Amino acid sequence: MYTQSDSDCHSSGEELEWSGNPTVSVTLRERSRNTVAIRQSLSLLGRGVGTEWQSVSECHTFVEEQEWSGNLTEIVTPRNWSRNGVAIRQERNGEELKREETFKYRFKKDGKKHTLFINEATKEDAGHYTAKTNGGQSVAELLVQEKQLEVYQSIADLTVKAQEQAAFKCEVSDEKVKGKWFKNGVEVVPSDRVQITHIGRIHKLVIDNVRPQDEGDYTFVPDGFAFNLSAKLNFLEVKIDYVPRQDPPKIHLDCLGSIPDATIIVVAGNKLRLDVPISGDPVPTVIWSKADKVITEMDGRVHVEKHPDHCVFIIEGAERSDQGVYTVLVKNPAGEDRADITVRVVDIPDPPESPRILTVGEDSCTTQWDPPAFDGGQPVLGYVLERKKKKSYRWMRLNFDLWKETTYEAKRMIEGVVYEMRVYAVNSIGMSRHSSASKPFVPIAPTSEPTNLTVDDVSDTTISLKWRTPEKVGAAGLDGYRVEYCKEGSDEWLPAQEGLIDCNSLRICDLPTGERLRFRVRAVNMAGMSGAASLPQPVTIRELVQRPRICLPRSLRQKVVKVVGETVNIMIPFQGKPRPIITWLKDEQPLDSKNITIRNSDTDTIFFIRKAEREHSGSYQLQIQIENTKDTASIYIQVIDKPGPPVHVKVGEVWGLNVALSWQPPKDDGNCEITGYTIQKADKKTMEWFTVYEHCRRAQCSVSELVVGNEYFFRVFTENICGLSDEASQSKDSVYIQKPGMQYKPPSYKQHDFTEPPKFTRQLMNRSVICGYNATLSCALRGSPKPKVMWYKNQADLSGDPRYRMFSNQGVLSLEIRKPSSIDAGIYSCQATNPLGEAKSECRLEVRVL
């Protein structure tokens, strides 16, 4: 399984793609023989010493031949490309991967694809793998999961005679899995008669010279898996006829450890079978009971079997309710005997309670949970935690080693995303069901402290503070601010206002006159309070006198352009103590306040026009005055509108399929510059108008491609930055295109001489480019007749070099250098010649290697 650190994981077999430079594709193949293949596709082009390749496959073939022959020197290798190519570096958790004698890692190239093979993958191979180039990198996370253990051959029940050999054999799917053998719940210890072997996938328990005490239930439990394989060893005795006599009954518990009160442990869901040998003559009667309740031969899942020399107690699919003390009573006319057997049912633990989120951070959280109410009869070894996004259905495991404590700090989460957590409990039997999900939570962090805390105003009893929003707010946003103050020399901070403040300023009233106070501001969000932004020096509470000063915004120092009907809303801040007198003028005359609204405050003045009109254009003067001191500022407002139509559209000369039109500029330009004209034509038969030209800058044009035999009308619209004029000016006379047969006498005029020598209107500019990325040199040329253009590098002609492409488009000359390297640096020149002269332009190209 692969996961990406900032994104969701994909299941086995999917392909992950990330956009970057170069593009990297990571694919997880099906796991076979514990080998994980990581395929990486990179755009690579390299060059060896004195060798050029036309394709990546040709380069790879050359590299492989050099490796087999042992002659590879400073050329492209699978892990180290030459200086002119791309460097590929494979890392795991920040450490470079190299070939080893054990061949743990193998590297393979196939064209643009690079593959990393990890042989015999183990849990230690999990981590972050990085493929780096000089243009970027790609990171993927490898998670190694354990295989499921399969049983190819289970152990079978055996019946042997005295002095014979008993051999239990089983086969599992994993050769590396070890296990333990148990007899009636007690681990079997190897001895001279008992041998335990493990060869490949086969596990054997061999008992030589079988004795009666060897009879019992034998179980093989693989390490790390919550299941077992059980079988019965029956001892066959050779009976000798003897004279019947009465013997008191006897229970033989040697197979249970030779203790009066034996304890049998069984895993929940497994079958428990107890064979208790008995003796007595005549054959005794066997009675099994639990808590003074007699168990019949067929009593649900728990039943008994009776035989002359032994009795059998069976529990099918053991459950927790089956746990307890079972009493076996044997009696005959000669007497009775009893024994107590304690059956202990162990199971996976109950799921823990829903985890609680104690604290959250910017990318982490601390969660806590209570141990499960029932540990399954075995101590809880640890816990496994998972998390997922609120809207996702896929849980991601957080720890692969069991966590011993009941508090865990989860990291590497995305701030602002809603998450949920759940917990599993693990004991020696297995893993419990998952707990219910925690309450959704969002990783957040306190904001940074507010910035630029300053004093805006001070009087004898009040102070006005203002500050800016913290630089780092975070995904949780801001709930507000808390302003505090204290006397100089004291550490007792008092809140300036109850609750939080929503805006970035506050006026604090009823302060002691003449007292020196310190002030600070904190930002508050869901994660708590930020650090404090404090004034550097204490402030004395007393009235200040300040000269009037207008703080004209930079945008108002230029012409303010508005369209007719738009709203004009201009706010100009100013300074001054006490509050200055504010006066607005237009063109040095008192302002007409019918359509213009002025609102003044202690710190700014607002100039407001609901719907701008043409007559609102002009120069406005603002003046503030305190006693004999004043300050002034001016702003210019230009209100523009659509222009009027052109004047006197006339049809000029007609020749062939062409007509010459002319007109005069409009009388009303809309209070701004005319940007062009739009000319339309209409056939007299249909009077449907079609656009001929748009954005025509001149007051005349020629209309071509008219149809012979049709009669046309023409009209012209004026255009400025507000758009086309609402009306058009139409030609009074129509134009009829004469049919063939008419002779046209062209006017005689002197031919203009357009010839001129070559001249570069835009010179070549020095360039600095990055190695491996296409570069283009451009210049502009003029000349008639058309000049012949030649490109040179260090005085060498580039015409026959396929690595350079030359373009010419409407006088713009371009030289494209495909994937330049350090040898492409130098002086490039462009030379143009025609019969009237020649011109030359040069520049320097620098190629940088990252």
Image: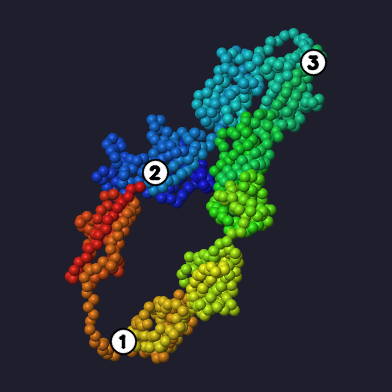
Q: CA distance from mark 3 to mark 2?
A: 80 Å
What label sits on residue 336 in the rendered view?
3
- Which residue is at 68% across, 36% downward? 370
- Which residue is at 35% across, 41% downward? 80
Q: Quickly name the residue at label 2.
A: 114
Camera-side residue of 50 and 258 = 50
Q: Tell me the crowding category of disc 1: few under 14, some 14 to 19, or many 20 or more residues within 10 angstroms, Cα based.
A: some
Q: Quickly name the residue at label 1.
A: 655
What's the residue type where badge 3 is placed? Glu
Task: Give the number of the mark in front: 3 or 2.
Answer: 2
Image quadrant where residue 295 sits: top right
| Sequence-wise first label, 2 or 1 | 2
Mark 2 near mark 1, Cβ–Cβ under 8 Å? no
Q: Position of residue 334 (x, y in %)?
A: 80, 12
Camera-side residue of 166 and 1 = 1
Mark 3 near mark 2, Cβ–Cβ under 8 Å? no
| Sequence-wise first label, 3 or 1 | 3
Q: Position of residue 199 (x, y in %)?
A: 50, 24
Query: 627 left or right of 278?
Result: left
Give the SS element for disc 2. strand
Task: Give the number of the mark in front: 2 or 1.
Answer: 1
Q: Is 781 located above or below residue 19 in the figure?
A: below
Task: Give the number of the mark in front: 3 or 1.
Answer: 1
- Which residue is at 59% across, 50% downward? 538
Query: 369 left or right of 3?
Result: right
What's the residue type where badge 1 is placed? Trp
| Sequence-wise first label, 3 or 2 | 2
Residue ranking furthest to the left? 835
Image quadrant where residue 322 sits: top right
